């Protein structure tokens, strides 16, 4: 896919400013399967670094404990991308202030509207298919659509021997 064709999948960047006060930790960003990049910068960090981690239990419980990725004011912004770090970019991230003073952190998230070649409404279709597999009633859905989906299901099952496994 040409780079200019990719633009249709991207949302505008999401910029957040977080202020940390005291020696504590808090959530930096929530988990998001459509996030493909995150930039973390702390331009006004006091003398010591901050620590970020996708696991809040690894963050410092005291100013002397450092577990995770440390970023200082003299460090360049941290860029985590799907290309390099895969699913790690989609995880939730936590930040800990290792100092008694307060300071701000900037995050810039790059997200997709949808992944390329993802079928719009696929999650809805999967939910309908799950309900069909469980034999649940499909109220609110056209009877013709329900009949079509049941026919597709039955055809697939007959090709796989009725139990979902290939013949």
Image: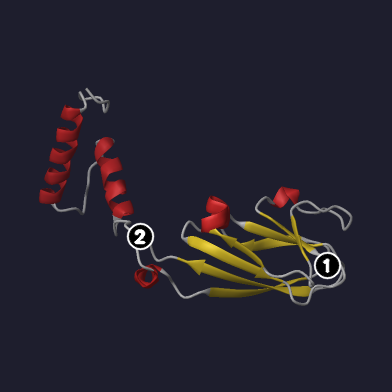
- On the picture, is 101 further left or further right than 91? right
- Mark 1: few/some/many CA within 10 Å (<14, 14-19, 20+): few
Q: Quadrant of residue 6?
A: bottom left
**Nearer the N terminus, badge 1 or badge 2?**
1
Residue 76, horizontal then vertical, whole percent: 71, 70
Residue 104, horizontal then vertical, whole percent: 73, 75
Q: Secondary structure at mark 2?
A: loop
Residue 166, horizontal then vertical, whole percent: 25, 26
Q: Secondary structure at mark 1?
A: loop
The residue to which callout 1 is attached is 22
Instruction: Give how far apart the Cα atoms at labels 1 and 2 are.
Output: 42 Å
- On the picture, is 67 further left or further right than 141? right
- On the picture, is 109 further left or further right than 105? left
Q: Residue at x 21, y 50 (%)?
A: 139
Q: Are marks 1 and 2 in contact (CB under 8 Å)?
A: no
User: Quarter holding the C terminus?
Assistant: top left
Q: Residue at x 36, y 67 (%)?
A: 2
Viewer-proximal residue among 112 and 135:
112
The circle on residue 116 is 2
- On the picture, is 82 further left or further right than 114? right
Residue 78, placed above or below residue 157: below
Q: How many marks?
A: 2
User: Quarter holding the N terminus?
Assistant: bottom left
Residue 24, horizontal then vertical, whole percent: 79, 61
Please name which of the two marks, 1 or 2, marks the residue nearer to the observer: 2
Q: Residue at x 20, y 23 (%)?
A: 161
Q: How is the image coloured?
A: secondary structure
Q: Residue furthest front?
A: 2
Viewer-proximal residue among 163 and 83:
83
Viewer-proximal residue among 57 and 115:
115
Q: Residue furthest left?
A: 144
- Mark 2: few/some/many CA within 10 Å (<14, 14-19, 20+): few
């Amino acid at each position: 896919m040409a780079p200019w064709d990719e633009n249709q999948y991207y949302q505008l960047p999401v910029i957040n400013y977080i202020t940390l006060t005291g020696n504590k930790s808090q959530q930096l960003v929530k988990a998001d399967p459509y996030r493909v990049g995150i930039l973390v910068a702390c331009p006004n960090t006091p003398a010591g670094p901050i620590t970020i981690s996708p696991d809040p239990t690894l963050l410092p419980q005291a100013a002397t404990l450092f577990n995770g990725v440390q970023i200082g004011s003299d460090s360049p912004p941290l860029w985590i991308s799907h290309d390099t770090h895969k699913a790690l970019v989609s995880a939730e991230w936590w930040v800990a202030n290792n100092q008694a003073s307060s300071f701000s952190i900037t995050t810039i998230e790059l997200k997709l509207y949808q992944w390329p070649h993802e079928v719009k409404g696929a999650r809805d279709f999967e939910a309908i298919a799950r309900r069909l597999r469980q034999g649940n009633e499909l109220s609110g859905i056209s009877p013709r659509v329900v009949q079509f989906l049941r026919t597709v299901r039955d055809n697939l099952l007959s090709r796989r021997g009725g139990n979902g496994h290939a013949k």
